[in-house]
Image (cartoon, helix red, strand yellow):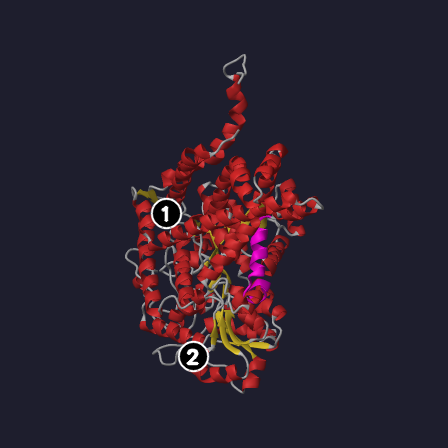
Amino acid sequence: MFKPLSLAGFALALSATASMAATNITWWHGMAGRNGEVINEVAKKFNEAQSACAITPVSKGTYEEALASGIAAFRAGEQPNILQVFDAGAATIINAPGAVIPAEDLITQAGYTFDREAFIEGVRYFYAAPDGKFVGMPFNSSAPIMYVNTEALEKAGVEAPKTWEDFETIAPKLKEAGYLPLVQSQLTWQFTENFFSRHNIQFATNNNGYDSVVDTKINMTDPNLVMMFTKLKAWADEGYFGYYGAGWNDNQKLFEDGKAAFWIGSSGSFGGLQKTAQKPFSATFLPYWGSVKGAGTNTFIGGAALFAMSGKPDAENKCTADFFQFLTSPEVQKFYHEATGYVAITKAAYELAKSEGYYKEKPAAEVGIQQLMLPSGEWSKGYRLGFYPQIREIMEREYGRIFAGETSVEDALKTIETEANDLLARFAKTAG
Amino acid sequence: MKRVQFSSPFLPYLFIAPQMAIIFVFFYWPSVQAIQSSFFLEDPFGFGSTFVGLSNYSDALGSVQYQAIARFTVVFTALVTFLSLGIGVLLAVKADTVLKGSATYKTLLIWVYAIAPPVAGLMGMMFFDQHIGPLVKFAALFGWDMKVGLNYYDTAFAMIAVSVWKQIPYNFIFILSGLQSIPVSVREAAAIDCRSGFRRFWTMTLPLLAPTAFFLLIINMTYALFDTFGVIDVMVKDKAANNPITLVYKVYMDGFRGNDLGGSSAQSVILMIVVFVLTIFQFRFIERRVHYN
């Protein structure tokens, strides 16, 4: 099998095997392109910083493929030391007790102190146990933010909206100025999961699924969500909103080409967008409905976390702990944050980037972290739902049907709720 | 036919052993595993599994979505098989009569087959891309606002077009060689008896092509059912959403993306049964009408 090793890492791995001095650990991830290269650089930095451990990162394709490979490997007893698992797969791995060693336990057992408070607000809960213990180590964390085509705003003579009400008033002007006012890239993450979080509305029973898998029911027919999608459909019909399918890039392209005024993307898109956007852009928070009471809370993290797989010798676990410790150091966090656009997950790293004037130079890079640090609400910390990748597929299907005019918003959301609840009940049986 | 004699009764088994080992490891063993796990509901990491009897099957077959996907698979398979065979026959018959530069024609028609399915999917995806696709722009000339990835039927059209395009060369090769094996004397006799080329094709050429066509029918059906996976995967860009998919893609989505091993195993067993029934049907009822000599 081809393993994209950095040269230095490869040399180090070789010398390590020769001298038997270093303990080798493996890290499977689902990142490609520029983000995959940055992972190799992080691994290289770790290998150069110390000599006791050598880490080998292996790209397993997409997030979904990384999770599937990790599971298959675990069943065969060949699991890697570290597996990257994305947000929607969190419930799968966290609800399988014994598959992973909680990151917090791993780190404290290795003799380090673990301070939950060192992490920024929005990343603390998503990959944690109900009591707040970190199970996964947050790694590449992102928030859905709104990118703004500054030229479009100037031409239309408007300001970037804070709320969707603001958007409704300026959309006709943007359209008149010859722009498609709004595009987005992931209705599930940006307009569903984070809709509940941004408006502080309960997403699922059992404390959004955190407390138990038994009898968890999803709240897809919430009147506010119905309103959001009814509006989106109406905007689409009037030419204020463009939907180009479930694919991320098909939608992003309109913004890159300067045809769309606003694009809801990921804070992690920042690095790539700097290269591909043909017009100057800035960024701001994901809008919310001012009419919804209590709205304007923070969003929770997207992206993925690193999980230490169980069934590994102590020496290797120690190395994994060392690596986690290394990853959360302000310098490494800052490097990763600036190289990719994913947010810095610790307060110290954020302060470091700030003190060096990074955000003065690139204000758009700060939006994601600021949005995660907004005041949180009871329901803004995310969700933990089983078979969630499949539930997302159902949402994608029904949302697509809404914009293709094949179904009504109410029917679509009702279908999602019914099918999702069936899957949740099924998951409860597997986890039981 | 003369029987080949082996000195030892075990020798023939020894000769087929490597083949059997491969079939066992890569087919029988996974099949047995799939059948077994289709009766269980299992957590992905394999910590616990509950025996659920046939409920994985009833869940799949009872689901409206599964039925819709099954219906699409039938239509898709029928259309892909019919179109790729039909166009393949047409091109082969025409290429067979070309005298000048026939090698060039044949090579041009065959070389598409060398393209790997994902690459074909990728090319198809670019041709049908919402923003830059030349075929989308071409369709727009006729007032067809083609939205592949967004509109169910447009995506279905694109998928079928790419799958057929990919399979035509394969059919072309086989049918061409089938045509060339028809003796010249028979052709000449037919040409003297009957002036209508169309009628000669139906009454003489096609019956003589029957063994090849029967073989291709089976191959094309399995192609449409299973091998189009790469094309579909690339065309829906990893997000099926409201786009049409086939049953094999559904097995992949539930098993490898959704980590629902029991449900996905049950679906793959259903597919195995479908193929089994199809094969029996073809050999029992269609092959009887085929004359090999």
Relative depth, front residue between A212 and B13: B13
Residue A359 in the figure: left or right of residue A228: right
Q: Magenta part mainly helix, strand or loop?
A: helix
Residue bearing the label numbered 1: B263
What type is the residue that disc 1 sits on?
A: Gly
Give the percent coordinates (x, y) of residue A424.
33, 56
Q: Which chain is disc 2 placed on?
A: A
Q: Residue at coordinates 63% horizontally, 34% vertically from top-left? A: B184
Q: Which chain is disc 1 placed on?
A: B
Q: Is residue B85 above or below residue B158?
A: above
Cβ atoms under marks 1 and 2 closer than 8 Å:
no
Disc on res. A363? none
Visible residue check, residue A59: no
Q: Is residue A201 above or below residue B125?
A: below
Q: Is residue A49 above or below residue A157?
A: above
Count residues near mark 1 (Cα–Cα under 10 Å), then give few for <14, some for 14-19, many for 20+: many
> Which structural element holds mark 1?
helix
Same subunit: marks 1 and 2:
no
- Using the rendered view, name the quadrant where residue A383 is placed: bottom left
Relative depth, front residue between B121 and B176: B176
Q: Read off the magenta span.
A: B116-136
Residue A106 in the figure: left or right of residue B134: left
Relative depth, front residue between A79 and B266: B266
Outermost residue on the top side: it is B7
Give the percent coordinates (x, y) of residue B79.
47, 50
Residue bearing the label numbered 2: A164
